[in-house]
Image (cartoon, rainbow, N blue to C red):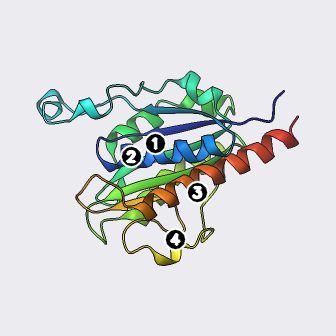
Amino acid sequence: MSCKPNILVLFYGYGSIVELAKEIGKGAEEAGAEVKIRRVRETLPPEFQSRIPFDKVKDIPEVTLDDMRWADGFAIGSPTRYGNMAGGLKTFLDTTAILWKDNVLYGKPVTFFTEASTVHGGHETTILTMSTYAYHFGMIIVPIGYGIPELFQTTTGGGPYGATHLGSKEELDEMERKIARFQGKRITEVAKAIKCCNK
């Protein structure tokens, strides 16, 4: 068995969360991972879906349970919704009971990322609400801590909990990009260490 880890970057959303997912994926690839970037299926009613910019994710496949089984490590992201993950991500995670029953994700590392348009819009609480699933699956939560200098310097997104984006503009600033790539590298390093130990 190869020690090269498979990393699944899974997200819900259509704005800067897409860019964060791509940067995390780049960081994971640079660290030697095989990467899949996947989105969850939209669950909002049709009258809301007409306003969603689907073109931003049209080339990103929807996640399947087989993608979850494939992965050795995970980066999971959602924009904040009143301090919680978005309903679309929660709906998908609620369908993963078979993975829980079969202990498929037990011992696998996971990290989280988010975005919000305001400073106090719920960055940390959103990451914490996403992490509750990891406890029930027996996963290993991998924060980024203060592992790179940009986390001491950023005035926008990013913190010890994970990569984030702050602001109404979808474009990430350079520090946010570096933090996201670092998060991809970190989850890859942890996933690789676990996979190699279990060979």
- Secondary structure beneath dot 3 equals helix
> Does the residue at mark 3 contact the one at mark 4 (Cβ under 8 Å)?
yes
- The type of residue carrying mark 2 is Glu
Residue 171, percent from left and from top: 31, 53
Res 169 → quadrant: bottom left
Vertical placement of 68 versus 162: above or below?
Answer: above
Q: Secondary structure at mark 2?
A: helix
- Return the x and y of residue 124 as percentages of the image width and height: 44, 65
Q: Of the two numbered discs 4 and 1 on the same chain, state the one appearing first in sequence.
A: 1
In percent of width and height, residue 77 lies at 44, 47
Mark 4 vs mark 2, CA separation in Å: 18 Å
Identify the residue position indicated by label 4 in the image. 150
Mark 1 and 2 residues: CB-CB less than 8 Å, in contact?
yes
Secondary structure beneath disc 4?
Answer: helix
Asked whether 166 or 41 is in front, the reply is 166
Cβ atoms under marks 3 and 2 closer than 8 Å: no
Q: Dot 2: within a 10 Å radius of its alpha carbon, few (fewer than 14), some, or many (20 or more) residues?
A: some
Q: Which residue is mark 3?
A: 182
* Depth order, front residue of 65/185: 185
Name which of mark 3 and mark 2 comes first in the sequence.
2
The amino acid beneath tag 3 is Phe
How many residues crowd mark 1 within 10 Å: few (<14), some (14–19), many (20+)? some
Q: Is residue 142 visible?
A: yes
Distance CA(mark 1)–CA(mark 2)? 5 Å
Q: Which residue carries the number 2 mark?
A: 19
Res. 81 mark = none
